[in-house]
Amino acid sequence: MIRRLGSQRFHRVVKALVVVTFLVGVSVAAVKGTGILFPDWSGPTAGNYDKPSSDMGKKATARRPWSITTMASSIDGKPIAGKPVSVVGEIIDLSCYLQVGKHGDKHRGCGQKCAANGQPIGLLAKDGTVYMLIDEEHNQRRDGLTEFRKQAIEYMAHIVRVNGTLTQVEGQNALFVQGYLKKQ
């Protein structure tokens, strides 16, 4: 075959086949989904998906998924549709996870520093779904009168059950958590 194609042409064909094989592999992986990034890199600090280490947040109800301040702050009294959920997952620093895939006990200290300095906090479910975690009470959150971030930093890299109100906008999952108002 090399004699018929010539050495240079043969190498071009081989390179093209390698590129096509790579692109097919990437396409299949994209369609299949990735689940948890680097699942074997580092396990959680505490808890597992069958037995979470803790529960966070008050359970919302279908009748009242939003707090009074969220309702009052919404446009025309109509916040984005939300449904009450309880999700088990690992508390993560979203910035490091979405940038370099880090999570688990090896990343706990870095994740705590990032979250303490304002980086977004998330929840990583067993199937790889990522939720941004946000204090639910609108006015108190805005005015710095909630302590969810403090609790989430403490539980960084722990697998916990988070109760709250789920919204999904343009493929983004946000889980709003109630019950962390500062004592006055």
Image (spheres, grey):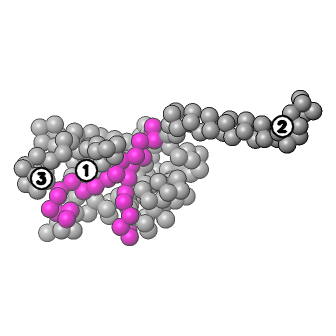
Rounded to the nearest angstrom, the CA distance separating label 3 from label 1 is 15 Å
Q: Amino acid at mark 2?
A: Phe
Mark 2 Cα shell of 10 Å, populated few (<14), some (14-19), many (≥20): some
Quadrant of the rendered structure where residue 181 is? bottom left
Q: Please give left or right for residue 12 compared with residue 57 in the image.
A: right
Which mark is in front, 2 or 1? Answer: 2
Q: Which residue is mark 3?
A: 74
Q: Which residue is mark 2?
A: 10
Over which residues does the magenta segment extend? 116-142
Q: Amino acid at mark 1?
A: Phe
Q: Which residue is mark 1?
A: 176
Q: Residue at 37% across / 57% down in the picture?
A: 121
Q: Please give left or right for residue 95 compared with residue 166 in the image.
A: right
x, y percent for residue 100: 53, 56
x, y percent for residue 98: 47, 54
Query: What mark, if any, has residue 1 been given in the picture?
Result: none
The N terminus: image quadrant: top right
Which mark is in front, 3 or 1? Answer: 3
